[in-house]
Amino acid sequence: MDDCLRQQIRELINREVVVATGCTEPGAVALAVAKARETLGSMPDRTELLLSKNVFKNAMGVGIPGTGMIGLPIAVAIALTSGDSSRQLEVLTVPSSCVDEAKTWLANNGDKISIGLKERCEDKLYIECICTKGNDQAKAVISKRHTNFVYVSKNDNVLLDNENQSCAGDAQCCSDPVLTERIVFDYATTAPIEELQFIRATVELNSAAATEGLKGYGLNTGRILMENAEGDIVHTVIARTVAASDARMDGCTLPVYSNSGSGNQGIACTLPVYEYGRAKGLDEDKVTRALILSHLTSIYIKRGIGRLSALCGIVNASMGVSSGITYLHGGNYDQVCYAIKNMINTLAGMVCDGAKPSCALKMSTGLYSAFVSAELALHDKVVDACDGLSERNIDFSIRNLGRLGNEGMDQTDDVVLDIMTHKQN
């Protein structure tokens, strides 16, 4: 593999594996609000948000860090009262005094915020914020990626306009390398180890979130699984991993490394591979390569599905895990492909019904499947090429999964959102 391609892949991973606090959709909404307020130059009289259905869905029921509250109103209030857009996806990480200020402001000014769906919105990740004060109005738009501003204006003064640039922040940038699973595997297993050490940074933050989660958050999925692990390595590894999701989805203030715009995907790609390798006493370099394989496989698969989808993100993340676990056991390229194919024919229909504390349950399902699929692959057992979405070629199989998530489940998203917004409680 030439130096240029290796550099492109490393830059891709560095763009997709970044630090985030709290669920990324409320964080991205808060980022847009902070930018619009900063552009306006003062506290607005009114703040209007227009969101794509996927962003709306993922922000409805998730905990906002450090607030003890769920949903967008408190996230918007924090962004208005103390948000700093330079903090990107850590915009909601503020001192407790700022949280108290936001809560007070929201209690007195909640009617100054309106949140709705963007009509005829083709982008699955779209956030438009309009802040108004008197005759002044500021607008900020994020599209395609959680931190990608495509439009900023104040009154008639357009400060940024990338809305018509097809490559601006899209799920696949013009500078991104063209990946195949063969390229992914070769990069992870043959690149100089010193070039891969950067991925170890994911371990410390995500492990800290797991330790915090074991104290009890959300449904206590991780803590309960750990209490019943009885020394079983796989059970223990999965318990620690989903504990991090428990904490994150229930409003824990600790940051984690995300993958493809999702903290849960970053947690899933990191902790099972690292914890399993450590429990098995494997060489650190091998674990590092497995972490790269896990993260980069997930990124590759996610690119076909799209940044946001009706397909749960644990699908692509756990496929990365399965490839990493297979490699840790000494599996070769063919066996890694077998593991991914087995996963495609296992988890392809898992629906995303919004970010929320019970995401930890879906994560546990994906990770148990990852270990089973890897075990079968190591025995050279793979689903037949005529089964379901699978084909003989691994990249065609991944492409088919992407089509399902990107094209085939649009109506599913509409139905899920309708159910979520019309519950008879």
Image (cartoon, rainbow, N blue to C red):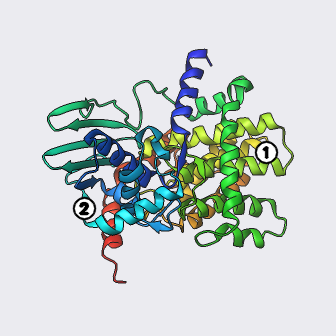
The front one of 413 and 36 is: 36
Residue 373 numbered mark, or none: none
Q: Work out whether 368 lies above or below 284.
A: below
Real-space CA distance between mark 2 and mark 1, rounded to the nearest whole angstrom:
56 Å
Quarter of the image with the C terminus in it: bottom left
Residue positioned 54% across, 59% down in the render? 347
Quarter of the image with the N terminus in it: top right
Residue under pointer 2: 112
In the rendering, at what x and y percent does residue 247 appear? 60, 62
Residue 246, picture quadrant = bottom right
Residue positioned 31% across, 48% down in the render? 127
Residue under pointer 1: 329
| Drawn side of residue 18 relative to residue 58, left or right | right
The front one of 326 and 199 is: 199
Q: Is residue 59 visible?
A: yes
In the rendering, at what x and y percent does residue 156 appear? 14, 34
